[in-house]
Image: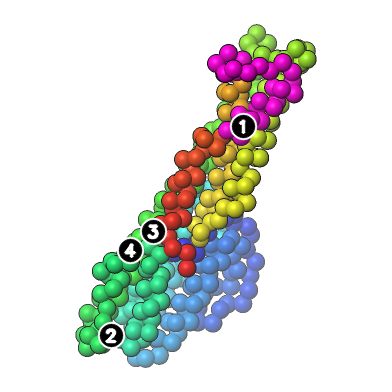
């Protein structure tokens, strides 16, 4: 898989004329699908130039085109389960990578010498600068032993593709974990309001003197809103300056959602500590109560910092070209 893949929604796809050299008439709506479509079109153009060399090349090119045709099926609508598992993205890019490696056999050594800098530049995104498969090339020796040269190029591509797949799997798992925590937090907040609405005997929050007649569930709801406001304010700078770094699963968006979902829970827990006397402050009015909720909601940064650190680690492991 490559850094260029991006997961997003999958709207209905309009059509266009079939590209020269292969492909279908589908114009994908999702960004990752569009980039897969563009890559497939590029490979078809390259295969068109390779098939005219001899009969053997024509047969192998036909097989590679058939292999690429299987990717066309993933450029339609996707379900939620597939979006979470990333199966279509994985299949599309691993198939493309397999075709790219197979095309090495169809190229002349001179062509591979010309393409080698591009292969190496792509590999430096994932491999260490001194990795043997990255630097073990010598133009004079390689041209004298073309079969060995092709094997070394294929080894470089194989290592690059494997490292890329591992990187994107880590990004997808982080996205899914953040999404799962966010959904759990939102469900917990909704349940808290519902339970408080159905229970008049137990109050999760002690109302201030000027809100003694306010329904307990309504007070809790406003505290949750204040916590979300605090979380939004504290997360705003990082959300504005964050970058995806080519990550395929919109991690900055998921980080922001996580903060907004966790902030209200932190606010309620913090106010419970205040009411219980574990924090040396008082809330004598509704305004003070909501103000404390905003402060505690902003404190979600301490809780969600693990996600920020992990996303930053992923960004630094891949050099943005």
Q: Quadrant of residue 221?
A: top right
Instruction: Please tell me whether mark 2 sits on a helix, a strand or a loop.
Output: helix
Q: Are marks 1 and 2 in contact (CB under 8 Å)?
A: no
Residue 139 badge = 2
Residue 282 included in the magenta stretch of the image: yes
Residue drawn at x 51%, y 38% is 304
Is the residue marked by circle 2 packed among few (<14), some (14-19), or many (20+) residues within 10 Å?
A: few
Q: Where is residue 301 in the image (x, y as percent from the top left)?
A: 55, 37
Percent position of residue 45, x then y: 48, 82
Tell me whether circle 2 and circle 4 mark residues in contact (CB < 8 Å).
Answer: no
Q: Which of 143 and 285 is in front in this view?
A: 285
Residue located 65% across and 35% down the image: 230
**Is residue 93 rendered to the left or right of residue 278?**
left
**Is mark 4 in CB contact (under 8 Å) with mark 3?**
no
In the image, residue 57 lies at what x, y percent?
A: 34, 85
- Residue 87: x %, y % from top left: 44, 54
Specify the label residue 297 is tagged with: 1
Q: How far apart are marks 4 and 3 (CA)?
A: 16 Å
Question: Which of disc 4 and disc 2 is earlier in sequence?
Answer: 4
Residue at image mark 3: 165
**What is the span of residues highlighted in magenta in the rendered image?**
272-299
**Of tags 2 and 3, which is closer to the observer?**
2
Q: How crowded is mark 3: few (under 14 residues within 10 Å), some or many (20 or more)?
A: some
């Amino acid at each position: 898989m490559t850094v260029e893949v991006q997961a997003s929604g999958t709207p209905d796809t309009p059509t266009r004329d079939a590209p020269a050299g292969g492909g279908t008439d589908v114009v994908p709506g999702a960004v990752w699908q569009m980039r897969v479509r563009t890559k497939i079109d590029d490979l078809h153009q390259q295969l068109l130039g390779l098939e005219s060399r001899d009969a053997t090349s024509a047969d192998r090119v036909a097989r590679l085109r058939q292999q690429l045709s299987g990717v066309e099926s993933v450029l339609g609508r996707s379900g939620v389960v597939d979006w979470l598992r990333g199966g279509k993205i994985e299949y599309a890019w691993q198939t493309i990578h397999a075709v790219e490696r197979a095309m090495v056999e169809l190229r002349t050594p001179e062509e591979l010498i010309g393409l080698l800098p591009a292969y190496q530049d792509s590999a430096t995104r994932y491999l260490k600068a001194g990795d043997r498969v990255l630097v073990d090339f010598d133009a004079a020796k390689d041209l004298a032993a073309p079969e060995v040269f092709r094997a070394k190029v294929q080894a470089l591509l194989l290592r690059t593709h494997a490292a890329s797949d591992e990187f994107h799997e880590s990004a997808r798992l982080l996205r899914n974990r953040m999404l799962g925590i966010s959904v759990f937090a939102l469900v917990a907040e909704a349940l808290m309001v519902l339970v408080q609405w159905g229970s008049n005997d137990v109050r999760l929050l002690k109302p201030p003197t000027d809100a003694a007649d306010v329904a307990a569930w309504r007070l809790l709801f406003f505290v949750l809103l204040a916590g979300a406001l605090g979380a939004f304010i504290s997360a705003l700078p990082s959300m504005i300056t964050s970058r995806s770094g080519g990550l395929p699963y919109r991690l900055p968006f998921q980080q922001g959602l996580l903060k907004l979902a966790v902030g209200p829970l932190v606010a309620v827990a913090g106010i419970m500590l205040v009411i219980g006397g574990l924090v040396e402050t008082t809330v004598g009015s509704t305004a003070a109560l909501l103000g404390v909720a905003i402060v505690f909601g902003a404190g979600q940064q301490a809780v969600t910092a693990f996600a920020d650190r992990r996303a930053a680690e992923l960004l630094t492991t891949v050099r943005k070209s």
